[in-house]
Image (tube, helix red, strand yellow):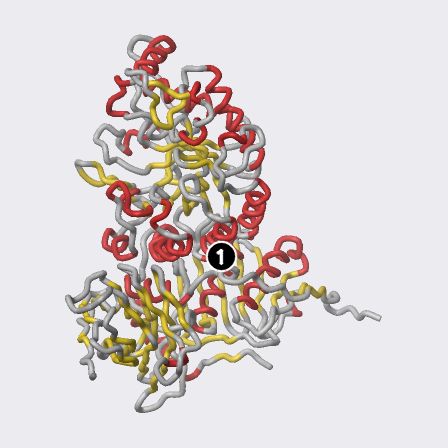
């Protein structure tokens, strides 16, 4: 039977360069930039009536494509009489989403109505949701579910969410999508820079460069040692992402040997910045990527990959950027949940693709200890990473300019490690074991802690930072329940000392021990600056995650005391599996609504805590965090899909100290750039390396 579409409320060979007919587009780009909006050139022959494009549900990349979160089943080989291209996606999971990213003036979504289908929530460009009932007494295919209505030519998103609700006649809550129709008005909109983090300076002329099979990667002879590895990786990535039919060759030569169509990588001083991550890109009949350091060249090439992935071409003109903060990080709790080496490798590539530069591996928790140990094999969980796997991850991280921070939490969160060592467990006032707590009053407990540190300091010898934890050691609001700690503190530091002083002393002693091995030590904020006598060493950095308890020290206390800070704002960036402990999954919409930037820390009960721009040197950066409290709540794939948008929102706003992008534009770009090359299939081999003869010399 015919189904009326749901009305959606709208939110209030030579390289080819397109030039002359884009001059007007450049003016449009300037106008849009002034209003904070941009548009992507659909680059199709202009026609009075425009054109319509049919997008299959299995199209997962490009400017018109589908993306899925939650568990979706992808079927293929179905009869084409009932399913477009013989494919479909269906799900029975509450809050699973299917999102169409498209460039045009409208989109229609088609799917199946069925006795087992439930209620869908539909929205355009992140606007309000409208409900649609997917139930029908008799299954019927290829029905129009929704029409967005007329939109301005440009990038948009149409999202379908399964609400988990159904009408009384339905037998289930499932939903299905088959294809979409995207309409364009055929106009030549200005070609936008489609990358994240968005460059801070853009001067585009409305044209675009398309690479061809004759395009080369060019490295200047004198910078071969510095940049050949960058060129080889980019060559493999271009082939893997299908930007070119084969991996382009790498050519080493001189300035006068560069030719049209080449991508030239170079290191040089850039004006107005000292950041080694800064880059500048100039695109004409060739591409010049210049980095202040090798890292800047790397981040510039991420921008090229994203534009090619999103629109198959690179806008002509120039862009440049430099990060607002030094560190942009993801923390992963691999202690509570076992994550495979391959999954972690994919996250490293995705982090680098989005402009992040740090991965913190939290490998010890109450529920698990996830890296193999030769010294204390008895503490390790059955599912664990081998040391060989960790070394592989370290190598891949280094290739992608990601630093890894080992996080071995102590003296709390050690239940798994203390299963085989009951003699080292802290007791409370009633003689019961304190969950996860090491008895730091015992010399043998300190020896045990140092033996673990020794082993993993060797494994992570190339890392600059070490996270000691020192959080949630005991119930900090009831320190009197642990007389062992209070008595030891008084004996060591005098009659006014308390358990917090003993914890701080442990952090100082361990940090001295770890710093001697070449690391800078970090701790969480919740147990620090609460003692009466002992002050935390000022060379220990503080990762500030919360002020949920009014007894926590305020941020200003840390600033006044001279500590370096990393913002782990839990209210914005804690992705806690199963939404345990009252957390809800972060979203780009909440991040934009808060107008978050790296200086926005967790609020006090009495008001906000904000470090204004320009940021002082003591604000090192910000981090997103995956905590695996309910490890079975999501699969690896669901975690990766669930964090991608909010993690990239954090990355965009960390690099740029906010964002000039609107939320709909951010969401559209996020969908268009898809995932990093090498995350969904192995990287291709890079092209061959050729060293050209010196210019002006003949070779016999």
| Residue 70 vertical position relative to residue 364 in the rendered view, above or below | below
For the view shown, which residue lies furthest in the left direction? 168
Q: Residue at x 40, y 36 (%)?
A: 367
Q: Is residue 108 above or below residue 496?
A: below
Residue 168, by quadrant, is bottom left
**Residue at (44, 26) in percent of width and height:** 418
Q: Residue at position x 39%, y 33% from top?
A: 366
Q: Which residue is mark 1?
A: 299
Q: Quadrant of residue 169?
A: bottom left
Residue for point 54% across, 31% down: 377
Q: Residues within 10 Å of mark 1 (few under 14, many from 20)?
A: many
Residue 131 percent location from the top left of the image: 18, 68
At which x and y percent is residue 280? 48, 60
Q: Quadrant of the N terminus?
A: bottom left
The relative height of residue 256 versus residue 582 in the rendered view (above or below) is below
Residue 281 percent coordinates (x, y): 49, 63
């Amino acid at each position: 039977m015919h189904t009326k579409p749901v009305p959606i409320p709208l939110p209030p060979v030579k390289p080819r360069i397109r030039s002359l007919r884009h001059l007007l587009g450049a003016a449009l780009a300037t106008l849009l930039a002034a209003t904070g909006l941009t548009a992507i050139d659909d680059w199709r022959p202009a026609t009075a009536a425009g054109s319509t494009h049919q997008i299959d549900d299995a199209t997962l990349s490009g400017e018109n494509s589908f993306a899925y979160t939650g568990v979706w089943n992808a079927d293929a080989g179905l009869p084409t009489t009932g399913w477009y291209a013989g494919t479909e996606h269906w799900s029975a999971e509450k809050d699973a989403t299917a999102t169409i990213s498209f460039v045009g003036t409208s989109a229609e979504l088609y799917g199946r109505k069925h006795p087992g289908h439930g209620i869908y929530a539909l929205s355009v460009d992140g606007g309000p949701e409208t409900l649609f009932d997917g139930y029908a007494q008799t299954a019927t295919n290829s029905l129009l579910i929704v029409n967005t209505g007329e939109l301005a030519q440009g990038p948009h998103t149409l999202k379908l969410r399964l609400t988990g609700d159904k009408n009384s006649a339905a037998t289930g809550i499932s939903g299905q999508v088959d294809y979409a129709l995207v309409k364009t008005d055929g106009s030549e909109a200005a070609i936008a820079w489609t990358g994240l983090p968005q460059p801070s300076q853009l001067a585009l002329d409305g044209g675009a460069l398309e690479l061809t099979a004759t395009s080369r990667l060019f490295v200047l002879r004198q910078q071969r040692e510095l940049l050949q590895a960058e060129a080889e990786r980019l060559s493999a990535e271009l082939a893997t992402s299908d930007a070119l039919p084969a991996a382009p060759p790498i050519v080493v030569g001189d300035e006068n040997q560069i030719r049209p169509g080449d991508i030239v990588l170079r290191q040089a001083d850039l004006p107005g910045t000292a950041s080694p991550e800064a880059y500048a890109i100039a695109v004409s009949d060739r591409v010049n990527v210049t980095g202040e350091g090798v890292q800047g060249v790397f981040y510039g090439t991420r921008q090229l990959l994203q534009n090619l992935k999103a629109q198959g071409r690179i806008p002509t003109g120039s862009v440049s950027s430099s990060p607002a903060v030094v560190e942009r990080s993801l923390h992963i709790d691999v202690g509570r949940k076992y994550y495979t080496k391959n999954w972690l490798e994919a996250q490293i590539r995705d982090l680098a693709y989005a402009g992040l530069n740090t991965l913190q591996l939290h490998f010890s928790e109450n529920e698990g200890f996830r890296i193999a140990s030769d010294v204390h094999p008895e503490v390790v969980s059955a599912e664990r990473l081998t040391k060989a796997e960790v070394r592989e991850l370290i190598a891949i991280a280094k290739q992608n300019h990601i630093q890894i921070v080992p996080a071995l939490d102590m003296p709390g969160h050690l239940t798994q490690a203390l299963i085989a060592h009951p003699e080292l467990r802290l007791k409370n006032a009633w003689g019961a074991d304190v969950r996860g707590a090491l008895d730091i009053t015992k010399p043998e407990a300190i020896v045990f802690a140092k033996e673990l540190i020794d082993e993993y300091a060797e494994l992570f010898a190339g890392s600059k930072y070490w996270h000691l934890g020192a959080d949630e050691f005991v119930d900090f609001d009831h320190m009197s329940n642990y007389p062992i700690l209070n008595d030891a503190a008084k004996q060591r530091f005098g009659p006014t000392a308390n358990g917090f002083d003993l914890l701080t002393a442990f952090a100082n002693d361990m940090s001295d021990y770890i710093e001697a091995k070449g690391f800078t030590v970090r701790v969480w904020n919740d147990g620090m600056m609460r003692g009466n006598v002992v002050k935390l060493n000022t060379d220990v950095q503080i990762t500030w995650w919360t002020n949920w308890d009014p007894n926590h020290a305020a941020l200003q206390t840390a600033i006044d005391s001279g500590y370096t800070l990393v913002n782990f704002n839990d209210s914005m960036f804690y992705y806690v599996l199963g939404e345990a402990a009252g957390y809800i999954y972060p979203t780009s919409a909440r991040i934009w609504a808060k107008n978050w930037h790296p200086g926005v820390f967790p609020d006090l009960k009495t008001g906000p805590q904000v470090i204004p721009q320009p940021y002082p040197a003591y604000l090192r950066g910000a981090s997103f965090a995956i905590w695996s409290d309910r490890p079975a709540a999501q699969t690896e794939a669901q975690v990766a899909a669930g964090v991608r948008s909010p993690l990239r929102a954090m990355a965009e706003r960390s690099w740029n100290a906010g964002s000039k992008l609107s939320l709909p534009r951010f969401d559209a770009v996020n969908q268009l750039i898809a995932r990093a090359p090498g995350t969904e299939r192995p990287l291709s081999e890079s092209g061959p390396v050729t060293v050209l003869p010196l210019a002006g010399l003949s070779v016999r």
